[in-house]
Amino acid sequence: MSAESGGPEASGPSGASRASAVQDGAPAAAGGFAIAPDAPRRTPLVAALAAALCSLGGNAISLVALPIIALQLTGSPLAAGVAGVFATVPLVIGGALGGVLVDRFGYRRSSIVADLASGLAVLAVPLLHAVGGLSFPALLALAFVGGLLDPPGDTAKTSLTPDLARLAGVSITRAAGAQSAVQRTAMMLGAGLAGTVIGLAGPMAALVVDAGAFAIAAVLVAVFVPRRLLAAPAAEAAVASAGAASVPEDAAPGASSTGGFVAGLRFVARSPLLRAIVLLVTLTNAIDAAGMTVLKPLYATEVLGNPALLGFMVGCFAAGALIGSAVFGVVGHRWSGRAMFAACFVLAGTPPYLAMALGAPAPVLLPVLLASGLAAGALNPMISTAMYGLVPDGMRARVFGVTTAGVVATMPLGAFLGGLAADAFGLGPTVAACAILYAVLGASPLVLRSFDGLAAARGDA
């Protein structure tokens, strides 16, 4: 790679016209990197997206491997639900505090540290198993630590995207689409790789691969995302003039963690669209947490008879979502809005649970998951584009941290109730109830006027 991507930017019309450097991606004026005035540099953006691909792919491997390990250790759906609680509670904590910590320590540094620490937490599971020291409580503790580190790392990479997109000369809409494509690709590749490795060598080997993916992500950001960039005078002036009006005082880098979180919470509370999105995704994530940590692992193990098929179930959905987000980026944005959002939500969640309720075999279930993924693929670009348009630079990490905490807030409860329901009523009735709930929640944007603002996802605004 070229040297221009690894160190300080020094070019510009003249030395006297250059702005001061911003260290380690920490917020300057309105937040994040300042923007270089010379030719576009795309290597940092590509490296950051590649790092997100590796770290999110690692998360997908954990998502598949850890529930199977919990079932193998205990044989209990309720215990798998408890493991899901320990994996998701830290997402709430990390989401609540992660944005403030990322703003305080810088996007780049936070991304590197979070990925390295996540890799160590994941690697500890197979290491303990190899020496005969992996108990169910130890698995719960490591799942908690790993989950606690994910939101800050994801928030840091998300917060880098707009600044690196401007550096690369890429529109924010295209960058958001690329980010969504990376998320979908990571889930598809990570889940498929997990299924393959679990089928060949077991879930512990999959976690070793997972730890390696986190290490690669940390190296990519450390090597290719610059520590500092230089701001163009015009860009800096625009940021300074807009920042005073749009960024609350308590959103400054020196704000306390509590004050920063409250500032982000107030921003979300004042936006009807953000409130509505967070509420809808929060409720459906509770269902998905039950599905991912308990119901789908049980279905793969007990109905399909092969735990490795869980990876291919997740991978098929992610593959469909990748195609769906690509199609949306080309033509779908022309029809984006409440009706499309509701239709995609219903189709993304209801058919897979309905198919499992009917006892669908793998040759039927996998295409259903693929088709549902096509509908799900349009959701993230609509949400991301609308959020980037609503949230000013100086509030970005705080608001993303708050929304991350909000949308995962019910996941621990969902995981626990999923295990409890499967244990008490059986797998079939539980997945049937999930299908009905998803249909009702997914259709809610048709009657809630707060979702009118999703029309902002059209075009390059």
Image: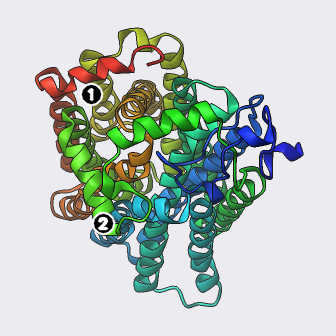
Q: Residue 94 in the image: state x and y as whole percent.
A: 39, 65
Could you say whether the residue bearing mark 1 is in a helix, strand or loop? helix
**Residue that mark 2 sits on:** 81
Q: Nearer the viewer, residue 40 or 159?
A: 40
Q: Reading the chain from its start, which is encountered first: label 1 or label 2?
A: 2
Residue 128 in view? yes
The residue at the point 64 percent across, 42 percent down is 49
Mark 2, Cα crowd under 10 Å, few <14 / some 14-19 / many 20+, is many
> Which quadrant, please, contains the N terminus?
top right
- Residue that sits furthest to the front in the current view: 16
- Residue that sits furthest to the left in the current view: 447
Residue 306 in view? no
Decide if residue 21 is on the left or right side of residue 404: right
The residue at the point 16 percent across, 20 percent down is 446
Q: Amino acid at mark 1?
A: Val
Q: Residue 234 in the image: state x and y as whole percent.
A: 59, 30
**Residue that mark 1 sits on:** 346
> Which quadrant, please, contains the C terminus?
top left
Q: Amino acid at mark 2?
A: Gly
- Residue that sits furthest to the right in the current view: 2
Task: State the count of labels.
Answer: 2
Q: Nearer the viewer, residue 1 or 137?
A: 1
Decide if residue 312 is on the left or right side of residue 444: right
Mark 1, Cα crowd under 10 Å, few <14 / some 14-19 / many 20+, is many
Could you say whether the residue bearing mark 2 is in a helix, strand or loop? helix
The residue at the point 50 percent across, 25 percent down is 325
